[in-house]
Structure formats: structure tokens, C-alpha cells
Amino acid sequence: MRAPYGWVRACSRRTTPHRGSPRARRKNTGSCPRSFTKAPRPATGDDLCEALNRPDLARLLGTPGEIATTASGSNNTGLLTDGKVAQPEAEIMFDTYTVNLSATYNELSTAQRVKLMKFGDEQDVKTLTVLGRPAVFSSDHTMKIEFSLGGEGSSGPVEQGPLARTLSVALDPKDRGGYFELTVWSKSGALPDDIALRGIAEKVLPTISERT
């Protein structure tokens, strides 16, 4: 029997829903790889989850009164980097929207990423400045994945899901490499406006500790 399909932007995870407070119970999905122990230390999935899992997040998204159903943090590493690039992420799910916050600690500047977007699938690319740092909005499709449960049969094919809207912000004002990504999507395809995403970034990013 197959589980209902879900929309994911990168990797998927399962957490136990918890209702009863405006903020969902946090769940960490793994220990820190070696790239998280090197100085200067990057933020962890727990750090990002703590910053994103705000009691006013639903209001900032334009859906006041909604309660987060899941919250999770993961200590991932970048693809094809042999575990050398830390890429933590956190995800908060509401009935209307799913919000993902990730950080990538590499040497790629936002200016370089904007140039690369010209050759990718990103849509509606728009550059701006957030918290005095170079930033860029972009849209890309999520992936629609159907999971198999209990080992019966195979999972369904990967299909194109609704658009997700992402705000990428450089880790520092000098744009020396690395970036945060704040991404929002929904099953219906509805998205909050860019002003809402920028407002969330301006609230959340300053609460993430500097690298030490």
C-alpha cells in the first residue's frame, strides 16, 4: 500500500505531528557530520529550527491562527561535496504552507548564484538587499513523490509539483560565499507574497548565531 504523495523541494522527512501549542514540538533528524565541527562552526539544524519555529510565524505568513503541525531540523551536507560542505535545514509545516530554512556554507557568492540562475530552471528571479546583504528571489517547482509503505510494491514516479518561492540571502554583507535560503510552498500552489517572505527573513535571520 502506498502512502499519499507529498511535495518536497529537496529531501523528505517524516515527523510526528503535535498539536496543542502555536509551535510544533521540535524533532532533530540526525547527529552532526564532521563538517559541522570545524571552525568557524556553522549553524546546526537545531539552530535553524529554533530560529524559524516562532510563535508568530503563521501570522507572518498571512495565516494567523494556524498551528504548526511539525517542526524538524537536519544536519545535512551539500550534494557532491563528500560531506565537506555543511548544509543544515529546518522545516515547519502548517495546514496552508510549508516553510523551509537552510544554510549552505560554501564559497559561492550570491552574485555568482544569480548568474547561474540564467542557465537553470528558476523563474521570476529578482535581486534585492535584505538586512544589508545581497539577496535574490526565485521560483522553482517542487517534486511530487509517492512513497511505498511496508515494502509492498514500488513508489510512484517523481512528478512536478507546485511552485515554491525562495528568498536566498548571503551569509554576510560582503557576499564572501554561502547563503541562507527561505522557501515556502503549499499543496494548492498558493504562495504568500514576496513582502511576507522578506519580513520573515528579517525576523528570523538575525536570531541565528554568528559562526564561532
Image (spheres, rainbow, N blue to C red):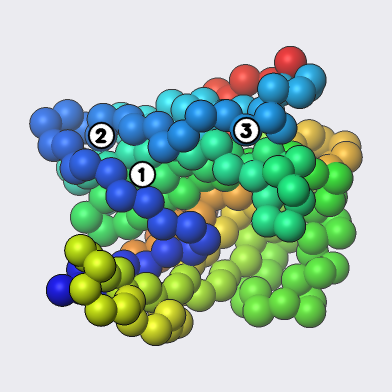
Is residue 166 visible in this depiction of the protein?
A: yes
Marks 2,1: beta carbons within 8 A? yes
Residue type (three-letter) at the residue carrying disc 2: Ala
Marks 3 and 2 sit apart, C-alpha to C-alpha, by 25 Å
Q: Nearer the viewer, residue 150 or 4?
A: 150
Nearer to us of marks 1 and 3 is 3
- Residue 96: x %, y % from top left: 26, 58
Q: Nearer the viewer, mark 3 or mark 2?
A: 3
Spot occupied by residue 151 in the image (x, y as percentages of width and height):
25, 67
The mark found on residue 24 in the picture is 2
Task: Identify the image quadrant of residue 149.
Answer: bottom left
Q: Residues within 10 Å of mark 2 (few under 14, many from 20)?
A: many
Looking at the image, the residue that sits furthest to the left is 20
The residue carrying mark 1 is 92
Q: Nearer the viewer, residue 109 or 16?
A: 16
Label 1 vs 3, first from the N-terminus: 3
Q: Which of the 4 image quarters holds residue 147?
A: bottom left
